[in-house]
Amino acid sequence: MKVFENIVVGKSSIPSLVITVILMVAIPVASFIFWRIRHRKETNLGYLIAGIIGFLVSARVLELGVHYLCIISDNPVSRFINGNTIAYVLYGITMAGVFEECGRFIILRFILKRNRTRENAVMYGIGHGGIEILAVILPSIILYLVIAVFFSAGDVGKAMSALKITEETAATALPSVMAAAAFDFPLMAMNVLERILAMVAHIGFSVIVFYGVCNAKKAFLPLAILLHMLMDTFPALYQRGVVPLWSVEVWGAFCVALIALIAIRLYRLRPATPGSR
């Protein structure tokens, strides 16, 4: 427990975390408001809600269920995957690509059969990417902020008591405490940029899958899965300590640019909805 006494919260940690929380909320909210105002007649809130539900079911229920069996629980399969970098990376990127894109396909193909405008494809992507920020990323940033506030007070014992950190949970809590203490404005910028890129990617994937559904072109679902896998490759490698953090951001920007170019092309190929701007 002595290691916690040596943790010093940086002066910029709390301000940068507060701004990060605000921006994490602003990204999906501003994206929705902008697109809805610009294309009110061509968009339907059902696509936004479907995107939210699609992400929660495919990524946070079904995919996590498979992760529990193949990664978290102790069995021969999980030991093999966790003990082999190549297997871990291939497993991670494949599960992310297959579950999220197949979930997107199923909803757009079999559930959302009305109002199939190209603008609604973007709305679906905003719902999918937006809820990922609000339900997955934002809670972690808020936790870091809470940790930074408690530890900045100077009373380590009181902070640990308030955060329910015990001898048994110390090893698990230490990485989060260190991350919160070290958080600064460069990390804030990196996190915000990463979320913006992810939002653009999710919108792009939605447009790609939507185009394939509306034009009965089966190749576009595998294309979306492959692009998703490519985008997640460097983050998975970083988790295993194979590549540095800066390479993840560079690779992410490259992949998102590629996804955006494909999606913009397909978006323009779809007939414009009467009255759209």
Image (cartoon, rainbow, N blue to C red):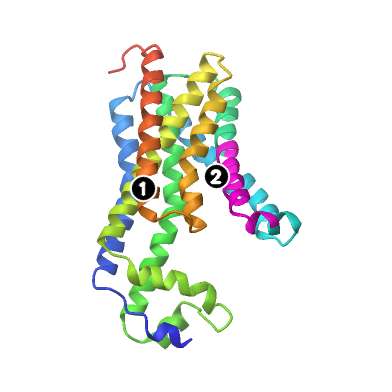
> In this orientation, which residue lies closer to the viewer: 271 or 221?
221
Query: Taking 107 as reference, is 269 left or right?
Result: left
Q: Residue at x 59, y 41 (%)?
A: 94
Name the residue tied to disc 2: 56
- Quarter of the image containing the C terminus? top left
Q: Residues within 10 Å of mark 2 (few under 14, many from 20)?
A: many
| Relative image position of residue 164 (x, y in whole percent) | 50, 78
Q: What is the number of callouts on the image?
A: 2
Q: Residue type at mark 1: give it.
A: Glu
Estimate the spatial distance between the alpha carbons at disc 1 and disc 2, rounded to whole Å: 25 Å
Name the residue tied to disc 1: 249
Q: Residues within 10 Å of mark 1 (few under 14, many from 20)?
A: some
| Relative image position of residue 273 (x, y in whole percent) | 37, 14
> In this orientation, which residue lies closer to the viewer: 66 or 241?
241
Q: Main secondary structure of the magenta part?
A: helix
Q: Residue at x 40, y 42 (%)?
A: 198
Above-or-below relation of 71 to 63: below
Above-or-below relation of 248 to 39: below
| Relative image position of residue 87 (x, y in whole percent) | 63, 49
